[in-house]
Amino acid sequence: MPVKLHFNWKDVPRALRFGFSLKKIWVQFLGLLLGTIGYSIFAYLALLVSGLSFREIWNFWKFVPVPVGEPMNVGGIILFILGIIFFIVLNFFFGVAVSKITYEQLKGDDFYEATEALKFAFKKGKAVIIAPISLVILAVFIIVCGIVVGLLGKIPWFGELVILLSSIPAFFASLFLIYIFFAFILSLFISAAVVATTESDTFDTLFEVFSTLNDENWRFIGYEALLGVVNFIGTSVFIWAIGRAIWIMHRIWGASWLMGDKYLAVEKGAMYYMTYSPIFYKIEGWLDFLKVGGILSPVNALPQMSIPQHILAFVLGVLLYFVVFVAIAFPLVVFWVGNTLAYIVLVKKKDDIDLLAQEEKEEPTESLIKEQEEKPEEEEKEEEG
């Protein structure tokens, strides 16, 4: 049975409820994990190409290099950018999977499988990437045309005439560039929801982006502002809970009558494997407020430990990365879920269509295709008879 929505702003805060789902967090966690592995490979190659040794990279960044401000040559910069693109693109596909799970849940299917959502995302989700890229290409084309006109304007006498004739079209082209910019931003927010709910291709996705931008721009801005506040509050509570869970482990296993100093040494060894990330230092005050600021203090050297302790420290260090991925996955899930809810509401507002009442498109199965192929042959035999 479909979930009953209010089809107004009251549905947006429900993103926390539908986002707090082990299945959705697992899907987004998997996207972050695979994306980070791919990014790290590109980042290591970028730094190696730029002259750093593997030992130098490992000693400073460990598993995930974040070379912000690090001088790199052209090849290194290209490889680093490719790593970032890989990470973003992959997680957009996983965002489609989260939106698809949410959509099926809203339609009443609480047991829709994560594997099915991922198959759908990688089969139908290309529009989520191609739609924004199409807008960028269109914007670049307009800018190049403007540059060409500007170069023609350098020609004596003829140039002035060209500028005079093209001044009004150039103004409207510049205005259209701003319009494309807003459409591009909007596409990053709702393209996953459009694909997940309507199985649209690139053209249909772009049509929905422009339709939403034209008809429901202020309502969309209001919904996103509300979603941002709700997501911030929910994520803060979620990360605080994770931090308290780690603190409980620290207090119990680190007690003098249990493992004591042995566990504290292992805990310190685990922090050795964490990366130095300037990105997290931008939110240092917030992390300190949530009592998880220790993640910003990786140690420079492993403490003196036995071999079993070293192995345990390494395993705990890897698990710490998993904990960080879970902490990052939750706000991303709420983002995808919230935008799915927002898009369903906006479609109801602008088109008076209830997407939850629509029947799912069924693709022809192999047996049906075979049956359709055999049917003309049977008809021919009957005619011959």
Image (cartoon, helix red, strand yellow):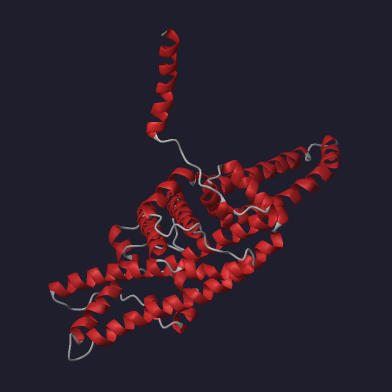
Task: Give the x, y percent position of residue 107.
Answer: 50, 57
Residue drawn at the location 22% of the way across and 78% of the way down: 266
Q: Is residue 149 above or below residue 93?
A: above
Number of numbered callouts drawn? 0
Q: Quadrant of residue 348?
A: bottom right
Task: Give the x, y percent position of residue 44.
Answer: 35, 56
Q: Is residue 198 above or below residue 255?
A: above
Q: Is residue 40 left or right of residue 147?
A: left
Task: Give the x, y percent position of residue 240.
Answer: 42, 80
The residue nearer to you, when weighing 84 against 238, is: 238
The residue nearer to you, when weighing 293 against 162, is: 293
Q: Is residue 211 left or right of residue 54?
A: right
Tell me, yes or no, if residue 322 can be seen here.
yes
Residue drawn at the location 68% of the way across and 50% of the way down: 211
The residue nearer to you, when weighing 132 against 268, is: 132
Residue drawn at the location 60% of the way across and 41% of the way down: 203
Q: Which quadrant would the C terminus be assigned to in this image?
A: top left
Tell me, yes or no, if residue 136 can be seen here.
no
Task: Give the x, y percent position of residue 127.
Answer: 53, 45
Q: Residue furthest left?
A: 307
Q: Is residue 26 left or right of residue 10?
A: left
Residue drawn at the location 65% of the way across and 43% of the way down: 138
The residue nearer to you, when weighing 224 against 384, is: 384
Q: Residue furthest bottom?
A: 257
